[in-house]
Amino acid sequence: MRSDEYDRLYLSPPHLGRHELNYVHKAIEDNWVAPAGPNIDGFERDLNQYVGTQHCVALSSGTAAIHLGLQLLGVGPGDEVLVPSFTFVATANPVCYLGAQPVFIDSEANTWNLCPMRLREALEERARRGKQAKAIIIVHLYGMPALLPELLEIAAEYGVPVLEDAAEALGSRHRGQALGSFGQVAVLSFNGNKIITTSGGGALLTNNGEYARQARWLSTQAKDPAPYYQHSAVGYNYRLSNILAGIGRGQMELIEERVKRRREIYALYHELMRDLPAVEVGPTEPAGTRSNRWLTTILLRPEHTERTPEELRQHLETHNIESRPLWKPLHLQPLFTSAAVYGGQVCADLFTRGLCLPSGSSMTDTDVRRVVKALQEML
Ligand SMILES: *Cc1c(COP(=O)(O)O)cnc(C)c1O
C-alpha cells in the first residue's frame, strides 16, 4: 500500500490478507451462512493451535467473551471483581452486566499493567471487610505482557480465579508461552482495530472442557436438550457467524507476519526518537517476554517539554495523522465515581503524559518517518 503526505494515517486500521475472501466465498457457495459452520470450527482450531489452549469458543465480540467468562467463574449480583483501572472500559462493563462491582487496581510503572503489590493490598483489605473477590481480570495493555508469575501466584494464594483479557495481546508471549493461555479463562478480540480482525468478533479460550461446553451453550440461547424449545437458564445470542469466522481464518494465516511488522514499527519509532529527550518510547519488555506491540505508545517527559499529549495529537491531526490518548483510567470515569480503587496515581500519570501513535501493520517505514517528523516540529 502506497502512502504519501496526503493520505490519512490511521491508528490501527484493518489489514486484510489474500485469503479471507476464499473462506468467505466458500461459506456462501456451500450455503453455510448460519452461525454454525466449518469456518467457525476451523477458526477455533487455528486459535487453539496458535495459543496452545484446548478449547476455544468463537463469539460475537471480546466484550461478550468477558461477559460469559466472568459468568463461568461464578460472578453474580453483589460480587466484587478486581480489575485494572488502566484499561478499555470493555474490560469492566461485563462486571456491571452481571450486577457485580469492579474494584480498581493501579498499574506498575514498568509494564503499565496490574501492580502485584496493589493487588495483594486489595485482596487483603477486601478480605478484612469480609469480601472475598470472585475473580481477578489481568489485562495485557497494548500487547505488553503483565507480570504473570507474580500476579498468578498472588491469585492462587488467595484462591481467586483469573480471567485473562488478552484482547490486545494475541501474538504476545511470556517465556515462549502465548498470552491467552494463562487464565482459567481468557478472552481475545477481533474488533476492527485489533492485531487481527473479523470486522467484529471475539473468542473465549480455556483448558476447562466444562467451561467451554457452558460457554457454547450460553452463547446460543441456552437450549436444553429437548426436541422443542426448552430453556432452564438465561442465554445469549453471542456466537460468531460462519462468514466472519472465514475472515478470521484468512487473518490467522498471517498472524506471525502481523506481529513481526508491528514490532518493526515499534523498533523504528524507538530508533528515530532516541535522541528526543522529551519523548520516551515504551514500555520496555520485561526479560523473557515478547509484546506484539499492538500500539506504539509514547510518554512525554515534563522536565524536557511543556507540550501536552493533546497538543501533539492536534498537531498530528493537521498532518492528517490519527493518534489517541492512552486509555483514561476507569477510576477517573464518571461511570465509576463510586467504585473502590487501590492506588491510582501511576495510571493517572501515564494518562496525563501518554499518546498512542499510528501502528497498523500496513504502515511503511516512510509512514513512520512522517509521524516522527511531525512530532519533531513540536518537540
Ligand atoms: C478491544 C478490547 C476489549 C473488547 O473487545 P470487543 O471485541 O471490542 O468487544 C476488551 N478489552 C480490551 C483491553 C480491549 O482492548
Image: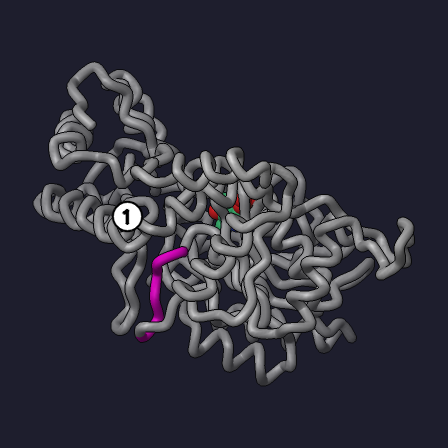
Q: Main secondary structure of the magenta part?
A: loop
341 shown above or below 158: above
Residue 272 drawn at (x, y percent): 10, 42
Left of 245 or right of it: where is 301?
A: left
378 shown above or below 156: above
Task: In this rendered view, identify the residue nearer to me: 312 or 367.
Answer: 367
297 shown above or below 217: above
User: Is the CB atom of the residue marked by disc 1 within 8 angstroms of ligand 1's nearest atom?
Assistant: no
The residue identified by callout 1 is 258
Element type at mark 1: helix
Outermost residue to the bottom: 157
Residue 231 drawn at (x, y percent): 89, 54
The image quarter containing residue 159 is: bottom right
Task: In this rendered view, identify the residue nearer to me: 349 or 2.
Answer: 2
The image quarter containing residue 170 is: bottom left
Quadrant of the image containing the N terminus: top left
Residue 150 drawn at (x, y percent): 45, 77
The image quarter containing residue 160 is: bottom right
Left of 57 or right of it: where is 274?
A: left
Q: Rate crowding at label 1 as few (under 14), some (14 to 19) or many (20 or more) other CA atoms within 10 Å.
A: many
Residue under the point 21% across and 43% down: 279
Color encoding of the figure: one colour
Total residue callouts: 1
- Which amino acid lies under the numbered mark 1 shown in the image of this protein? Arg
Quadrant of the image containing the C terminus: top left
Any part of residue 44 in sight: yes
Residue 167 drawn at (x, y percent): 48, 52
Residue under the point 40% across and 35% down: 21
Q: Is residue 288 magenta?
A: no
Residue under the point 39% across and 38% down: 22
Residue under the point 89% across and 49% down: 229
Looking at the rendering, the stretch of residues picked out in magenta corresponds to: 170-175
